[in-house]
Image (cartoon, rainbow, N blue to C red):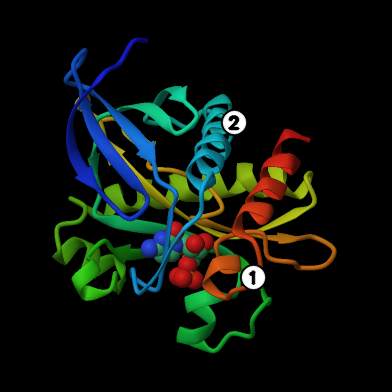
Amino acid sequence: MQATKKELIYEGKGKKMWSINESDDLLISEFKDSLTAFNGVKKAEESGKGALNCKISTLIFDLLKKHGIATALVETISPTEQLVKKCKIFPLEIIARNIATGSLTKRLGIKEGTKLPFTLVEFCYKDDELGDPILNDEHCLLLGAVKSQSELDELKKIARKINGILIKFFDERNLKLVDFKIELGRDKDGNILLADEISPDSCRFWDKQTDKKLDKDVFRQDLGSVKVAYEEVLRRILG
Ligand code: C5P
C-alpha cells in the first residue's frame, strides 16, 4: 500500500512513529540505527542496525502470524520502515525467560546460564523516570496497566505462546532463545496485537554449542561488533 509520512508523532530510543496521509488507523514505524542500554545511559550509532532489525522483526512477525498470533504489522514498505496498525499499547514490557541472565541473575542470584524449570513471564512498567520497575500482578492492576486479572492472564498466555513458537524455531537454527521482551496493544476493534519489534535488540540469543552471545548484550558488554552478531542471527533465520 502507498503510504506517505505526515507527522512525527513519537520518537523513542529505537524507533520513530509517523502518522500517514492515507489512513488514520495506520502508522509508519521507522527503525533507527541508535543503540541504547542501561535506560539510555550507554548510547551508540551503528549504521545498518535499523535495517537489520527491521528485516529480522518482519521475518519473526510473519512466522508468528502463520502460527495464529495477531500482529500490528501490515507490510514492510522499505528496508527500515513498516506500515503498522495503530493500537493502544499496554504500558508494560512483557518479558519471557527460559535461561537465567541479565536482571534476573542480579535480582534473584540465580546463576547465569541456569535453565529455568519453567518459562518465567515478568512485567515491567514502561516508565523511564522510574527505571522500568518490575511489577507483580497486583501492581499491574493498581496502576491500571490492565483492566483485570483476566486481561493480564491473556497477556501472559500470548507471551507463552510466542515463546513456544520461537524456542522451536531458533532451536532448529542452532540458537538458544534465552529471553525476550514484547509489547502488546489493543487495536480500535479491541483485538490484542503484538506490536513493536522482536529482534536482537529485544531478545537474547546464544549459540547452542558455545553460548556465544548474538544480541544486544554484545553492545551492553562490549563483546565485539553488534552488526556482525545481528547479521549472524539473520543468516540463521534465513537458513
Ligand atoms: O535486562 P533484562 O535481563 O531484564 O532483559 C530481559 C530481556 O528483555 C532481554 O532480552 C532484553 O533485551 C529485553 N529488554 C528490552 N527492553 C528493555 C528491557 C529488557 O528489550 N527495556
Q: How far apart are the two marked residues, 2 and 1, measured between alpha carbons?
A: 26 Å
Circle 1: residue type: Pro
Residue 218 x, y percent position in the rendering: 60, 67
Q: Label 1 belongs to which residue?
A: 117
Quarter placement of the N terminus = top left
Q: Closest to the observer: 95 or 238?
A: 238
Element type where label 2 sits in the image: helix
Disc 1 is placed on an element classified as: strand
- Based on the displayed image, in which of its 4 quarters is residue 110 positioned? bottom right
Residue nearest the viewer, comparing 68 with 39:
39
Q: Residue at x 27, y 74 (%)?
A: 131
What is the crowding at mark 2: few (fewer than 14 residues within 10 Å), some, or many (at least 20)? some
Residue wearing tag 2: 63
Residue 203 located left or right of residue 121: right
Q: Which quadrant does the C terminus fall into?
A: top right
Establish if 94 lies above or below 81. below
Does label 2 or label 1 sit earlier along the sequence?
2
Residue at 74% over, 54% down: 175
Evaluate whether residue 122 shows in this view. Answer: no
Discs 2/1, front: 2
Q: Are marks 2 and 1 in contact (CB under 8 Å)?
A: no
Q: Nearer the viewer, residue 111 or 201?
A: 201
Are there few (<14), some (14-19), or many (20+) residues within 10 Å of tag 1? few
